[in-house]
């Protein structure tokens, strides 16, 4: 197991390097120039000398290979540099936004788990009954309902029924937990319900498959309690595909909630992504892509380790 962990950690290095190469050269292929965009806001015409000076200041006058080596050297030192658009350190640009997006992703994942696993198990145990049909309708509705639209419904409902709006200015949890939760609980419910739909259907399908296995019938024939059969034998084995779906959704939530963040006035990583790409801010966009790629890789690594805990038959060599 130790060798497998070390091997997986070492494999992260070439994966992240590949992501770095792709995003660096892809940003240079995308049409648009951050220098021209910056001067376009000042006047319709800018002298070539000013454009050249700005490119030299940003390091864009150097050869591509030199820019790449400079950026990779910073990554090795965990130094993302400064934003080409604002001039602020990228770590400061990301720090508060990452905390917001991470908390929202964790809360939405908790909501999805609390909805998906119990409903999926109940639907599998009561297959083809009204309970099963109700859970399936609920999951289909979740798949068909965009989370940002559900967020708008939440805001309108709170305003019309209770004459109250959630706070629209983000407050860190360690500053004021009550105000923080009062703001983030609603986008977490909207996003969590949307993504619980996939996990609910996966839980139901996996449970139905496991409940038909021979070892479940053997356990029942031995007279084991039904709760023990479900928790120790059925649910653990059914959780493998569900865990994969939930983990991938969690990683996606870190930077993929652009519209939902706009609805609830949240300045998270999704909004920062849009601003960075719109401004052709090479360094900030590259840092955000590397951050999200690392989250995806690390979450998959944790999922693989959890497989061995859920299913003792799995042995990594």
Image (cartoon, rainbow, N blue to C red):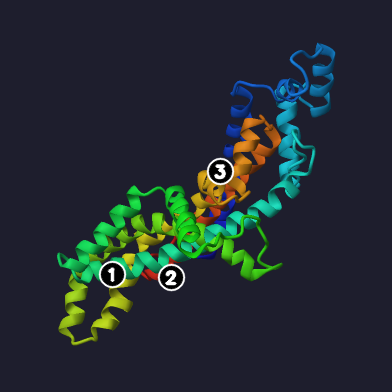
> Residue 54: horizontal and vertical position, in percent?
81, 23
> Residue 38: horizontal and vertical position, in percent?
74, 25
Of the residues under marks 3 and 1, which one precedes in the sequence?
A: 3
> Residue 231: horizontal and vertical position, in percent?
32, 77
Q: Nearer the viewer, residue 224 or 47?
A: 47
Q: Relative to 36, does residue 130 appear above or below in the rendering? A: below
Q: The C terminus appears in which quarter of the rendering?
A: bottom left
Question: Which residue has dot 3 on it?
Answer: 15
- Marks 1/2 in contact by CB < 8 Å: the verdict is no
Question: Which residue has dot 2 on it?
Answer: 309
Write the residue at 63% across / 49% down: 267
* Crowd rating for badge 1 (residues with CA inside 10 Å; few <14, some 14–19, many 20+): many
- One can see residue 3 in this view: no
- Marks 2/3 in contact by CB < 8 Å: the verdict is no
Identify the element where label 2 is drawn: helix
Q: What's the mark number on residue 121?
A: 1
Of the residues under marks 2 and 3, which one precedes in the sequence?
A: 3
Q: Nearer the viewer, residue 187 or 269?
A: 187
- The quadrant in which residue 119 appears is bottom left
Write the residue at 28% across / 53% down: 140
Q: Relative to 32, does residue 210 appear above or below in the rendering? A: below
- One can see residue 89 in this view: yes
Disc 3 versus disc 1: distance between alpha carbons?
36 Å
Q: Horizontally, is 233 left or right of 36 in the view? A: left
Q: How many marks?
A: 3
> Residue 224: horizontal and vertical position, in percent?
23, 86
Write the residue at 21% across / 75% down: 216
Q: Nearer the viewer, residue 139 or 163?
A: 163
* Crowd rating for badge 2 (residues with CA inside 10 Å; few <14, some 14–19, many 20+): few
Identify the element where label 3 is drawn: helix
Q: Nearer the viewer, residue 242 or 193?
A: 193
Q: Relative to 90, does residue 172 appear above or below in the rendering? A: below
């Amino acid at each position: 197991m130790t060798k497998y962990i070390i091997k997986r950690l070492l494999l992260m290095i070439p994966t992240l390097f590949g992501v770095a190469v792709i995003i660096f050269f892809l940003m240079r292929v995308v049409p648009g120039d951050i220098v021209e965009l910056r001067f376009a806001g000042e006047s319709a015409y800018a002298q070539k000398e000013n454009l050249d000076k700005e490119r030299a200041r940003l390091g864009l006058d150097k050869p591509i290979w030199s820019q790449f080596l400079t950026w990779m050297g910073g990554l090795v030192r965990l130094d993302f540099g400064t934003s080409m658009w604002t001039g602020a350190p990228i770590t400061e640009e990301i720090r508060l936004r990452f905390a917001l997006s991470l908390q929202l992703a964790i809360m939405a994942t908790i909501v999805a788990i609390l909805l998906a696993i119990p409903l999926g198990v109940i639907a599998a145990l009561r297959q083809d009954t009204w309970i099963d049909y109700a859970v399936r309708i609920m999951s289909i509705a979740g798949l068909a309902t965009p989370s940002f639209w559900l967020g708008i419904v939440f805001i309108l409902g709170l305003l019309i029924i209770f004459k109250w709006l959630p706070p629209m200015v983000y407050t860190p949890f360690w500053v004021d937990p009550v105000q923080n939760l009062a703001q983030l609980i609603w986008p977490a419910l909207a996003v969590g319900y949307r993504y619980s739909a996939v996990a609910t259907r996966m839980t139901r399908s996996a449970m139905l498959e496991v409940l038909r296995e021979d070892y479940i019938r053997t356990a029942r024939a031995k007279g084991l309690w039904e709760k023990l059969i479900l928790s120790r034998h059925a649910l653990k084995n059914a959780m493998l595909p569900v865990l994969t779906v939930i983990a991938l959704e969690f990683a996606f939530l870190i930077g993929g909630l652009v519209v939902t963040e706009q609805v609830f006035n949240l300045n998270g990583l999704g909004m920062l992504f849009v601003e960075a790409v719109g401004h052709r801010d090479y360094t900030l966009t590259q840092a955000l892509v590397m951050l999200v790629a690392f989250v995806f890789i690390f979450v998959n690594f944790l999922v693989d380790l959890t497989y061995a805990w859920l299913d003792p038959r799995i042995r990594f060599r």
